[in-house]
Image: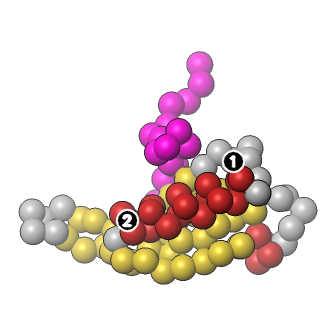
Amino acid sequence: MGEEFLTFKGKPLVRSKNTIYYGDMSEKYVIKFDVLSTKKDDRGIEKADKIIVNLINNDPDLKEADRVVKKSEKNGFYNAMDIGSIWLERALKG
């Protein structure tokens, strides 16, 4: 039985601690979100505040440092997801 993942625009979102991957790991590119800080909203719910967004090349032959294609820091997960999904879509189209 296959694992079920939360998806956005048909691509999986997978979280490990403060890192979230967006995209299919079998494709050429994925997005990596690193949550640097969080803050509580008016209701006391903790939300991601500062996030580093990376477009990552999945080529295993590349050195780790050479895999980052684009990088940006965003405030809030909505803003990070917005730019990350655009970068991923454009990169996968070629």
Residue shown at 54% from the left, 79% from the top? 72
Q: Could you say which is closer to the camera, residue 63 or residue 74? A: 74
Mark 2: secondary structure: helix
Density class for disc 2 (Cα within 10 Å; few <14, some 14-19, many ≥20) is some
Residue shown at 13% from the left, 65% from the top? 44
Residue 52 location (% of width, % of height) = 51, 75
Q: Is residue 1 above or below residue 73?
A: above
Q: Taking 39 as reference, is 44 left or right?
A: left
* Quadrant for the N terminus in the image: top right
Q: Taking 86 as reference, is 8 left or right?
A: left
Q: Which residue bears the numbered disc 2?
A: 77
Q: Is residue 52 above or below residue 32?
A: below
- Which residues are drawn in magenta? 1-18
Amino acid residing under circle 1: Met
Q: Earlier in the sequence, mark 2 or mark 1?
A: 1
Amino acid residing under circle 2: Phe
Q: Could you say which is closer to the camera, residue 43 or residue 89? A: 89
Mark 1: secondary structure: loop
Residue 21 sits in which quadrant?
Answer: bottom right
